[in-house]
Amino acid sequence: MINRAKTIPIAIFSIVLCAYYTAVTPPASAQAVSRKVPGSMAQDMRVFVDTPAIPGYESALAAKIRTRLAVFHPQRDNLDDVIVRIGSGGPVRLIVAPMDEPGYVVTNITKQGYLQLQRLPQFGDLPLFNALYSAQPVKIQTVSGKWIPGVVAGLSVHLLPGRRHAPNPDHISNMYVDIGATSAANASELGAKNLSPVVIDRELYDMGSGFETSPAIGDRFGDVALVELLRRIDPSKIQGTLVVAFAAQQWTGARGLERILDEIHPDEMIYVGRLTASPPNFAEPNLRRAPRRQPGSGVLIGEQSGDEPLSGFAATLKNLADRNNIPFVRDYSGPLLPPSYLAPPPMPEKSVHLGIAAAWPDTPAEMISTHDLEDLANLLEAFAQGSVTPGSAITGDSASTASPAVLEPLSTPPTNEQILSRLVETYGVSDHEAAVRKMVRSLLPKWAKPRTDAAGNLILHLGTAPVSAYVPSLLFDAHMDEIGYEVRQILPDGRLAVITKGGGLPYFYLGHAALVHTPDGKHIPGIMELPQGWDEPGFKWPRGRALMYRVDVGARSASEAEQMGIAVGDFVTIPKKYRRLANDRANCRSFDDRLGDTALISAVWALGPDVKNRNITFAWTTGEELGLVGAGKLAARLASEGKEPQYVFAIDTFVSSDSPVENPRFGDAKVGEGFVVRAVDNSSIVPRNLAEKVIRIARANRIPVQYGATGGGNDGSAYLRYGAIDVALGWPLRYSHSPGEFISLHDVDALSRIVVALSRNW
């Protein structure tokens, strides 16, 4: 008979003993050589940069890293640091990389529903960081973890001339996020709350010669290198204990690193992350020091000392790099542990900071070399286990962005949003409107047979009327072009010298990703370089349309750029995509004037092929942003043929001051409250009686209408000298000529309906 009183303690002892050995012995999967970390360096980089992680909000990125490394059973601490331990005993070697990036949190929601922000980190030197967020697409995380789209408010270029004290875009007090909310309560209903994190919308682009660009890429390469190390590592080759850690809140006081140091007490430490500038010296700002190596330099060791020979642990790593033919050079970097309220934990005597060069650091156009990243992963592997096994290639397709496919002629009417979304995602800078013209054709009904004139304008005539009948001749004009740049020269170092095509504020474009568009349909990624001195005290943005800027596509010689398919005359834009916001709002660059194009296409569908007793011409014109070029040529030709219209309805943006950064005394048309009679602008004035006539027709057809004065010019003014009357119409647009352009789909519908009503009733 078994004595249960004696067996129970034995069972308990067995459970405790098993738990003890489970705690002190690394999991079998972490000891085995046959473990498998999924993915590749290329996949890791794309996933990690796509996952926002501002300080204190790293949990989503930490979770993805833990999932990648599940075979090693990573630990997670109270700050969301991720820690992997391999081996046992001494020495204890720590390899650690940060996870976080600079960003913002919501700190107030205005009565109108705009979000105000505070940057994290709250202090520190981040040149132009706020300015380069201006008028950019962003996303805001809700409490549930969902990300919702928005845009940062920006100054409208048409309303800016003459302003003596325009808001400084680099000042945090002038930053507002627009999610399409109509009130503070509505913003809250949509999920925006105080402390919601806000980050710039991002995409990773593979450039030529192994370069990559993305916001926060300089904050992620260390994570990619460490995951790759664990992908390659053979635990049986590890001597002592290897700790691989991913630290939180590096930007806000290195709190994660301090937590890890307090817990691990390593004998050696390699910190893998971006090299940083010296702390701000407000007494002597010109003494600022910063890393200056360029991508392609290999592995960098960050130091604050001078040019004396490397010694100690740094020299050991240099020798290891030399034995494995890994480029290894020194550069400046600030301290890893900044001053704090408490004394920091002790750093191991054997400590080094490794990184790779990042061009345009902490900007949306930040760029690294994947060859440098491969070198870094190789060096870490050689340090950890004494040998190097080549990793997976990280580069991707250097021309991966494509325009939307052109539709076959449609048999059923598309919605206004379907028309608009396709038009705005088609690229066509002034003098390069062919793809837009082709898209317009494809969106018209099959029965429509427009023709293209010598100026590239697309023209469609509707209506039949007896010769003896008096029928007013009407022309509706919307332009197809968008602002951008054109390649004027391929420089000997492979960079492109570009000129502007149309006007825009430089910080909306410079310091961001770009696309070079070739005649054969390629869209080659690059970056718009910032002007010289951009990160120095007292920097001022250049002004004027005649300026020339540089685009880096990754080529390092003129022949390399040409081999990529780039030629003088190609056009350049900032990438764009149609984004639906709350309350039927939407965001995309080039709503000016693709929304006008949409209204004309929609009206053609509504009117049909048999418009009796009317004389109507629809014109989609070229080169408006360069000075009404296409409309001017069309107006002159029609006049020379005796076919000048009596009334021209120019359909273009009503640049609105319905924005938290504009003065409402001028251009105050409200988004969402209908189309606008553009009664006064810089190029024409609508006769008062005709403005009132448009309003009467709109109200008779229950179409919401507004009217007012704004800036800029319109195509209709090109016809004035030949006797036509210009009745300019538009829709309210926030943040004109920027990536943050913002509209209401209700206004799109109102505009398309008024074009139909005027066609039938004028």
Image: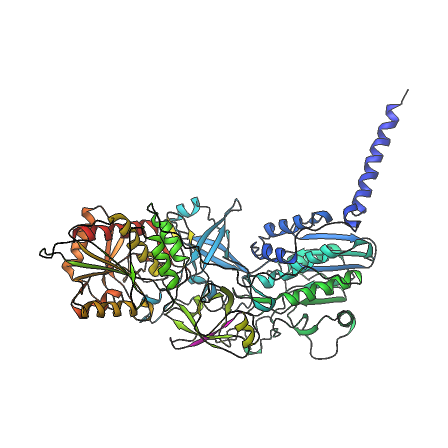
Q: Residue at x 43, y 57 (%)?
A: 151
Image coords of residue 110 (percent x, y): 40, 53
The stretch of residues the image draws in magenta is: 543-555
Image coords of residue 623 (percent x, y): 33, 68
| Residue 226 in which image quadrant | bottom right
Q: Say whether residue 122 is left or right of residue 328.
A: left
In this rendering, the answer to whether 604 lies above or below 339 is above
Tell me the quadrant of the picture where the N terminus can be found: top right
Image coords of residue 658 (percent x, y): 33, 57
| Residue 431 in which image quadrant | bottom left
Q: Residue at x 84, y 35 (%)?
A: 14
Image coords of residue 356 (percent x, y): 65, 68
Task: Examine the residues drawn in magenta and state their main secondary structure.
Answer: loop
How many labels were placed on the picture? 0
Q: Is residue 669 magenta?
A: no
Instruction: Pick whichever, 661 or 245, lies toward us.
Output: 245
**Residue 682 visible in image:** no
Residue at the top extreme, as displayed: 1
Residue at the right extreme, as displayed: 1
Q: Residue at x 27, y 67 (%)?
A: 631
